[in-house]
Image (spheres, grey):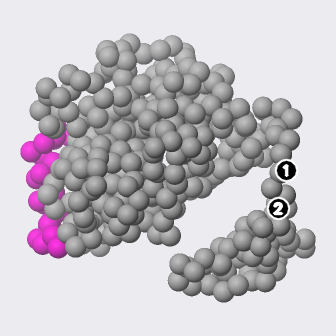
């Protein structure tokens, strides 16, 4: 790196890091008065740096569309983050595709409730700009700040992982305010529980479910709403909205296929296969990691590792990550299906389900649960009884652990941490509050 744009809020990390370098990059310092901590590090002030530029300079652009434009790391849900190399062509097409999908134009006002480092903000860093829309930024993503920014700026669009939607849906009444108009919110990074979609709609948000990966420049599919869904019951409609949907307009090719034969599965909504993508909006590969690159791009397809089904209407639905499927007594259990039920419990704010080793069954579901603020008397037995009322008995958690869930910097739940906790927990102690 030749240039380092540094926010003084991170001075405690930046200062020692620069001292470790034999040849430090030029430091451009952002002294944001809204930052509540940190000190200046002696770099060139950002405003002065910008003022010293040539206003008529025309950048030459890439020599080749295949040149790398940026390096973005996966969020590390497996504990092994990898750096994905993006190309100019992929960034251009991904940004325009997502702007088109989300309906952005020059009248749009986009609120940043999504980390810009996550797939370059799902390419909306570029997409919002390409549409000549307005960017509205937040120092921190907090419910009161979000609602205030929407009201003050006439926000029309925003994106966020389900954890952000869940946070807004459960915000205290004092932090909320009526929306000035319908606000479109795109969510992805994990499947949004249908109960969260319902709560967001009640507050005046219009939810669009996207699916993608760092390796595919963020969103690759969207759950395009269909008019006939309005005739369905509310729970069924929200379940349809939680599917991953159809490819965005500039995806080269996508399929749910047998990972061994690469043959597409039948569109019966039942046969499980792996979601695969190829085209211009797939990364060049992982930086300095040819082994992982070969595994991810085997057979000229990006292997997502996500297992799903293909419905007769052409919509895809992810059932689970391949590593998150629970095999109990020879039966496959989708952790997402169990989590969907847990999120419907009136006293549960967050939930995650992983496999716990079991001497008899091989594996059994173990639920990690964060109760809603103010919830009283939620017990493991009550959670398990709720699941038995709504699921086949063999899919129900046999163990429940209460407490906060470990997450990545992008808000994804770190199931590899939970799997280790499930393995370590003794059979007599995990059913109590942790």
As drawn, 204 above or below 172: above
Q: Nearer the viewer, residue 362 or 213?
A: 213
Q: Position of residue 251 (x, y in %)?
A: 56, 25
Q: Residue at x 37, y 18 (%)?
A: 314
State the residue position of label 1.
Answer: 57
Residue 236 sits in which quadrant? top left
Q: Residue at x 52, y 51 (%)?
A: 134
Q: Position of residue 23 (x, y in %)?
A: 90, 71
Provide the secondary structure element on which disc 1 rests. loop
Q: CA distance from mark 2 to mark 1?
A: 8 Å
Q: Residues within 10 Å of mark 2 (few under 14, many from 20)?
A: few
Q: Which mark is residue 335?
A: none
Where is the N terminus found, in terms of image quarters? bottom right
As drawn, 245 above or below 357: above
State the residue position of label 2.
Answer: 53
263 magenta-colored? no
Where is the C terminus found, in terms of image quarters? bottom left
Main secondary structure of the magenta stretch: helix
- Drawn side of residue 34 relative to residue 290, left or right: left
Q: Residue at x 12, y 32 (%)?
A: 233
- Drawn side of residue 237 relative to residue 87, left or right: left
As drawn, 169 above or below 181: below
Q: Which residues are magenta?
A: 374-394
Inspect this view and state whether residue 66 appears.
yes
Provide the secondary structure element on which disc 2 rests. loop
Give yes or no for contact between labels 2 and 1 (Cβ–Cβ under 8 Å): yes
377 magenta-colored? yes
Q: Position of residue 52 (x, y in %)?
A: 83, 67
């Amino acid at each position: 790196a030749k240039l380092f744009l540094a926010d003084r809020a991170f001075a405690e990390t930046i200062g020692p890091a620069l001292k470790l370098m034999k040849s430090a990059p030029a430091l451009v310092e952002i002294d944001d008065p809204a930052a509540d901590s940190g000190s200046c590090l002696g770099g060139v002030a950002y405003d002065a740096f910008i003022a010293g530029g040539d206003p008529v300079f025309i950048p030459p652009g890439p020599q080749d569309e295949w040149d790398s434009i940026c390096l973005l790391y996966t969020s590390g849900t497996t504990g092994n983050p990898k750096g994905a190399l993006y190309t100019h062509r992929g960034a251009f097409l991904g940004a325009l595709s997502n702007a088109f999908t989300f309906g952005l134009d020059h009248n749009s006002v986009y609120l940043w409730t999504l980390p810009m480092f996550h797939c370059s903000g799902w390419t909306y860093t570029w997409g919002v700009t390409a549409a000549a829309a307005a960017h509205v930024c937040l120092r921190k993503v907090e419910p009161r700040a979000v609602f205030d920014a929407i009201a003050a700026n006439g926000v029309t669009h925003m994106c966020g992982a389900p954890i952000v939607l869940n946070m807004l849906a459960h915000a205290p009444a004092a932090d909320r305010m009526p929306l000035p108009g319908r606000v479109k919110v795109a969510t992805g990074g994990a499947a949004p529980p249908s109960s969260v979609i319902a709560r967001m709609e009640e507050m005046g948000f219009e939810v669009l479910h996207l699916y993608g990966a760092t390796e595919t420049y963020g969103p690759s599919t969207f759950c395009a709403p269909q008019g006939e869904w309005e005739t369905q019951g509310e729970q069924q409609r929200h379940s349809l909205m939680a599917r991953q949907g159809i490819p965005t307009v500039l995806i080269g090719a996508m399929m749910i296929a047998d990972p061994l034969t690469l043959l597409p599965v039948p569109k019966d909504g039942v046969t499980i296969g792996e979601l695969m993508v190829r085209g211009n909006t797939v990364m060049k590969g992982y930086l300095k990691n040819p082994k992982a690159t070969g595994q991810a791009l085997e057979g000229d397809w990006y292997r997502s590792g996500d297992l799903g089904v293909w419905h007769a209407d052409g919509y895809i639905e992810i059932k689970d990550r391949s590593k998150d499927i629970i095999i109990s007594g020879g039966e496959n259990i989708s952790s997402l299906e169990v989590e969907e039920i847990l999120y419907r419990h009136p006293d549960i704010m967050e939930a995650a389900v992983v496999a716990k080793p079991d001497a008899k069954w091989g594996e059994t579901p173990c639920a990690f649960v964060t109760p809603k603020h103010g919830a009283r008397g939620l017990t493991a037995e009550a959670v398990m009884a709720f699941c038995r009322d709504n699921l086949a008995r063999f899919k129900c958690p046999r163990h429940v652990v209460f407490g906060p869930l470990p997450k990545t910097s992008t808000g994804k739940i770190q199931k590899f941490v939970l799997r280790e906790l499930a393995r370590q927990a003794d059979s007599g102690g995990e059913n109590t509050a942790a």
